Image (cartoon, rainbow, N blue to C red):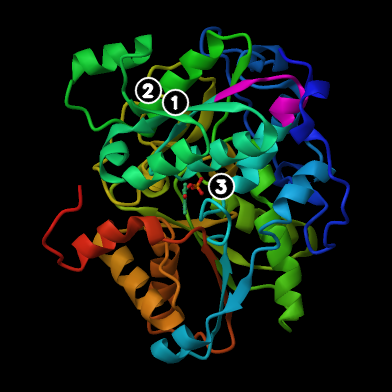
Amino acid sequence: MANPEDNPKLHALGFAVSSKVPTHWYNLVADFPEPMPPYLNPRTHEPVQPADLEPLFPKSLIAMEMSQERYIEIPQRVRELYSTYRPSPLFRAHNLEREIGTNARIYYKYEGNSPAGSHKPNSALAQAYFNAIEGTTRLTTETGAGQWGASLSMACALLGLTAEVWQVRASYDSKPYRRMQMEVYGAQCHPSPSQLTEAGRVLLEQDPQTSGSLGMAISEAVESAVGDPHAHYALGSVLNLVLIQQSVIGEEALVQLQEAGETSAPNVVFGCAGGGSNLGGLAAPFIGQNLREGTSTRVVACEPASCPSMTQGEYRYDYGDTAGLTPMMKMYTLGHDFVPDPIHAGGLRYHGMAPMISHAYHLGLMDAKAFAQEDTFAAGVEFARAEGIIPAPESTHAIAGALTYLRDGENHDDEVVLIGLSGNGVLDLPAYHQVLGGQERPA
Ligand SMILES: *Cc1c(COP(=O)(O)O)cnc(C)c1O
């Protein structure tokens, strides 16, 4: 491991960060009425001990993963980096309200202004920081659509680490711009499965034409990190630590809704759910408020019909990856060898759901609904034509959730509806082009 003292990019610049950038992350674990089931060691099936995770993560992140604290302080250096794009805006969707003809008040929390165009830097910067202060020099990771790979590559560049990314084959081929983004940040990006790891070679032997999956890419990134004493692994979703770091979204939204004049808690929050991190980040502070203060905000996880882990999966222990290298987590899962169709919303193609979200869903603290791709894109196009922002294909699921709800024939007058707009779709224009009936398929 390197001496972190030698890394000048780690030192706080010491400027006064706006008080609108949260000082603490929120951890829903502290407010659950029942404890979450522990992770299990994949070999012994005993509860995972912190030391079991040390080949993968630095000690500070392992502590965050297992933390029971309600609020966790955000380091000054991370707040400085957040302040380049946070607080993220909360917009009232006046134009969309008029299009729909609703008397509900629709708000959306927009994460697409970050350097990577999504919520993912919220966790990437924190994970890169905690690794760097413990002397990690290289981070490995997986990426679906490329949002997480690009975010971690950016974070590593800003904090003086190198990044190596395994990108799901389907997205590697169909979404070259994220790969190019990673290159600009100085990272290495491989299509997964690859010949570079044992897990990848086995998968390619079984099916040389496989379009890949997040589970496969995780296996490769984990194997690469475990084999290198200077490297750790970073996961872009699913883990408690990621959902905790993403809670800046919901913590800001709580304050911003008040600033917008809302005196009571929102009626419904819609978020898209792949691994559960943007949804968890936005919704957990509201679920916590329900549990502590008796508010009754309903949270709806919006997932793709082609990868419906919550609405069609089983709640059981499963691996986080295809090869079975990660701890076993109790979660809603379609099975760790499930390979979803290559839909445009690459970031939602994960077989499982964050254990924290799964636990909340199992306890009846939130709902879930699945949406077909044609309906989500129709919602995305409608949103773009009303509000101007072209949403990421993933985010269109949350919009479809809200539009379906507001058009269900019930009376929603004076309700407050909050949509998590997890990212912009500027690098996903070929997907919109195709869905709108465009002929030529971009390379
Ligand atoms: C990655 C991604 C998602 C899905 O991941 P979660 O962990 O479920 O949030 C959603 N939206 C965007 C824009 C993404 O990049």
- State left or right for residue 66 relative to residue 279: right
| Magenta span includes 135 | yes
Question: Disc number at residue 120?
Answer: 3
| Ligand 1 closer than 8 Å to label 3 CB | yes
Q: Is the Cβ of the residue at disc 1 closer than 8 Å to that at disc 2?
A: yes
Residue 262 on image: x %, y %: 71, 81
* Residue 37 found in image quarter: top right
Question: Disc number at residue 322?
Answer: 2
**Residue span colored magenta:** 130-139
Would you place residue 384 above or below residue 287 in this image?
below
Mark 2: secondary structure: loop
Would you place residue 168 above or below residue 418 in this image?
above
Which of label 1 and label 3 is nearer to you?
3
Q: Is the Cβ of the residue at disc 1 closer than 8 Å to that at disc 3?
A: no
Q: Which residue is mark 1?
A: 218
Mark 1: secondary structure: helix
Q: Residue at x 27, y 17 (%)?
A: 203
| Magenta span includes 119 | no
Mark 2 crowd level (few <14, some 14–19, many ≥20, 10 Å Cα): many
